[in-house]
Amino acid sequence: MTLPFRLARTAVFAVVCLGLGVAAHVLGGASVPVPAMAAALGLAFAAAYPLSGRERSFAAILSLLAGLQVILHLLFSLSHAASPHALAGHLHSGLVPDLGMLVAHGWAVGMSALWLARGEAALWGLLRRLAVRLLVIRLPLLTTPFSTPLCTTEPPVLRSAVLRHVVSRRGPPRAIAA
């Protein structure tokens, strides 16, 4: 895989991970200093880069995102120099969050992982189709009288898992014979 493509995928994951962590921490009532954000971005980038070489599943994205959110939570909680009064105003004052904060973090991580996994599937589907179309364009140039024909069928179109099993009953009602 080319380096710019891999770096772009890693950067998207790192920015989403950092944005989720910072937003959750700030909405929880704490502050996040700029050096902690820079360190968190570097940490998320370093963790995601080795995994960006090929398509990843929802489970892989979810586990990496959840693990990084725990680490970022600890980093942000330890990094801001807050007075005991400001720390008491923080929803999860200290390193151990309460149940509400765990549910909020879990929901946000799950939704972000789902969003990233769907984007990942769409991107790789687009790249597969592009590869087949480029192959079809170059096929006349590559064929010789003695070569075997190449497979040029496009991969199937990805459909939403929700809409795959929906039964549509649109239209006027059927007339009942009396």
Image (tube, rainbow, N blue to C red):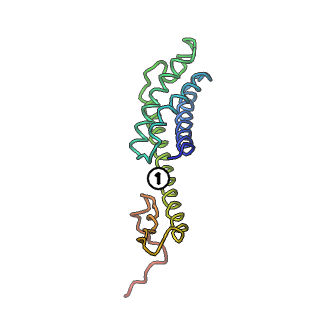
- Is residue 137 shown above or below 176? above
Classify residue 166 as left or right of residue 28.
Answer: left
Q: Nearer the viewer, residue 109 or 75?
A: 75
Q: State the image quarter where residue 3 is shown.
A: top right
Q: Position of residue 39 (x, y in %)?
A: 55, 24
Identify residue type, mark 1. Ala
| Residue shown at 46% from the left, 46% from the top | 114
- Is residue 55 shown above or below 86? below
Q: Position of residue 1 (x, y in %)?
A: 49, 47
Locate the C terminus by quadrant: bottom left
| Residue shown at 44% from the left, 28% from the top | 70
Residue that sits furthest to the bottom in the current view: 178
Q: Nearer the viewer, residue 68 or 4?
A: 4
- Is residue 149 shown above or below 64? below
Few, some or many C-alpha atoms within 10 Å of disc 1 (few <14, some 14-19, many ≥20)? Answer: some
Q: State the image quarter where residue 36 is shown.
A: top right
